[in-house]
């Protein structure tokens, strides 16, 4: 006669249940009850930008773009990009978009996450990740627009 569940299956199920209970109980401890005021949004956005400086993200993207530039021109490309990119404008656009779309609590959560070791590790990889994604996404959008135009042309 076969047993309905082994000791190890029951132990595993009990362990999973215990973890779920602990995490469920812990979630309120992570919640930050922050009033959603313009001042709190601005403060949380500033903490987020401190945790993820736009200049570092721009440097990562420039570093990846540099790989597409002939080797002898790379240093000049980096220097020019650093001179020409207006980080104050990028920061202002980022803050305005954050203030418009996120609550103070959401911005605070972003700041805490990206200020954490895992968040910092993700931030360091995000420029490379973005540089890898943008060209194929752009190419696919261009292809789709061209396809749309050719379909409309022949109707």
Image: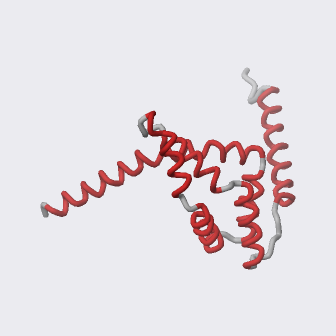
Q: Name the image quarter holding the C terminus.
A: bottom left
Q: Tell me the residue at 72%/46% (across/down).
A: 120
Task: Count up the numbered dots.
Answer: 0
Tell me the residue at 73%/20% (across/down): 1
How far across and how far down the image is residue 51, in percent? 74, 55
* Left or right of 109 in this view: 87: left
Single out the residue that lies furthest toward the left.
154
Return the residue nearer the eye: 127 or 4: 127
Q: Is residue 132 visible?
A: no
Identify whether 86 is placed above or below 16. below
- The answer to whether 37 is drawn above or below residue 29 in the figure is below
Q: Residue furthest top?
A: 1
Q: Is residue 64 left or right of residue 16?
A: left
Counting from the top left corner in percent of width and height, residue 100 is at 62, 74
Is 150 in front, or is 24? 150
Colouring: secondary structure
9 or 26, nearer to the observer: 26
Q: Determine the image quadrant of residue 72.
A: top left
Q: Residue at x 78, y 37 (%)?
A: 13
Q: Quadrant of residue 101?
A: bottom right
């Amino acid at each position: 006669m076969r047993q309905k569940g082994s000791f190890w299956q029951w132990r595993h199920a009990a362990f999973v249940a215990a973890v779920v209970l602990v995490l469920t109980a812990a979630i309120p401890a992570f919640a930050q009850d922050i009033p959603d005021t313009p001042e709190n949004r601005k403060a949380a956005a500033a903490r987020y930008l401190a945790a993820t400086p736009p200049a570092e993200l721009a440097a990562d993207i420039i570093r990846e773009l540099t790989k597409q530039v002939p080797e002898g021109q790379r240093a000049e490309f980096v220097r020019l990009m650093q001179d020409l990119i207006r980080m104050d404008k990028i920061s202002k656009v980022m803050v305005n978009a954050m203030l418009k779309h996120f609550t103070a609590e959401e911005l605070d959560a972003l700041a805490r996450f990206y200020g954490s070791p895992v968040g910092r590790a993700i931030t360091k990889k995000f420029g490379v990740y973005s540089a890898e994604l943008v060209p194929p996404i752009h190419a696919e959008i261009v292809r789709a627009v061209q396809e749309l135009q050719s379909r409309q042309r022949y109707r």
